[in-house]
Image (spheres, grey):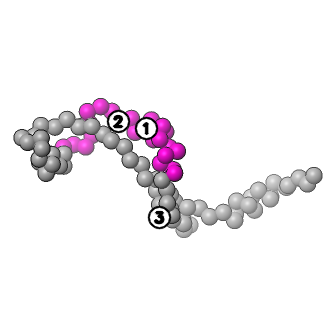
Amino acid sequence: MTKHAPDDESDDRNCKTKVRVRIPVKFEVDYIIEVNNSDDVDEIQEKLLNTDASRWESDPQFYERLGDDWYYFVRKITKEHSEKVVS
């Protein structure tokens, strides 16, 4: 049985390429707003654009949701989501 010297591990790391990966994370955040016509999507969009984005109905718990759905998000990654990191 051959033992590997500690230098073998560092040589292996030197051959690897660093990549930056953008993980497509999607979740929903609820808002309560007042509008004149609840069927008018344009009015709803305009009202939301003029609303402070942090005024959600309840705390969306971004970190918890990310952890719960991590496997699903990672499985949605495609080649377009990664790029080589140039040092």
Residue 86 locus on image (x, y percent) = 54, 68
| Rendered residue at 49%/56% (across/down) | 77
Residue indicated by mark 2: 60
- SS for dot 2: loop
Residue indicated by mark 1: 65
Q: Residue furthest front?
A: 39
Instruction: Sort mark 2 into few (<14), some (14-19) or many (20+) by Cα contacts within 10 Å.
Output: some
Q: Is residue 72 left or right of residue 30?
A: right
Q: Is residue 14 left or right of residue 67?
A: right
Reply yes or no: does residue 68 show up in magenta. Answer: yes
Disc 1 and disc 3 in contact, CB within 8 angstroms: no
- SS for dot 3: helix
Splitting the image into 4 quarters, where does residue 13 fall? bottom right
Reply yes or no: does residue 54 show up in magenta. Answer: yes
Marks 1 and 2 sit apart, C-alpha to C-alpha, by: 8 Å
Mark closest to the chain's N terminus, 1 or 2: 2
Q: Amino acid at mark 1?
A: Arg
Instruction: Sort mark 1 into few (<14), some (14-19) or many (20+) by Cα contacts within 10 Å.
Output: few
Q: How many marks?
A: 3
Q: Amino acid at mark 3?
A: Glu
Residue 37 locus on image (x, y percent) = 8, 42
Residue indicated by mark 3: 80
Splitting the image into 4 quarters, where does residue 7 fall? bottom right
Q: Is residue 33 left or right of residue 13?
A: left
| Rendered residue at 43%/38% (across/down) | 65
User: Can residue 73 be seen at all in this image of the molecule?
Assistant: yes
Of 17 and 6, the residue lying toward us: 17
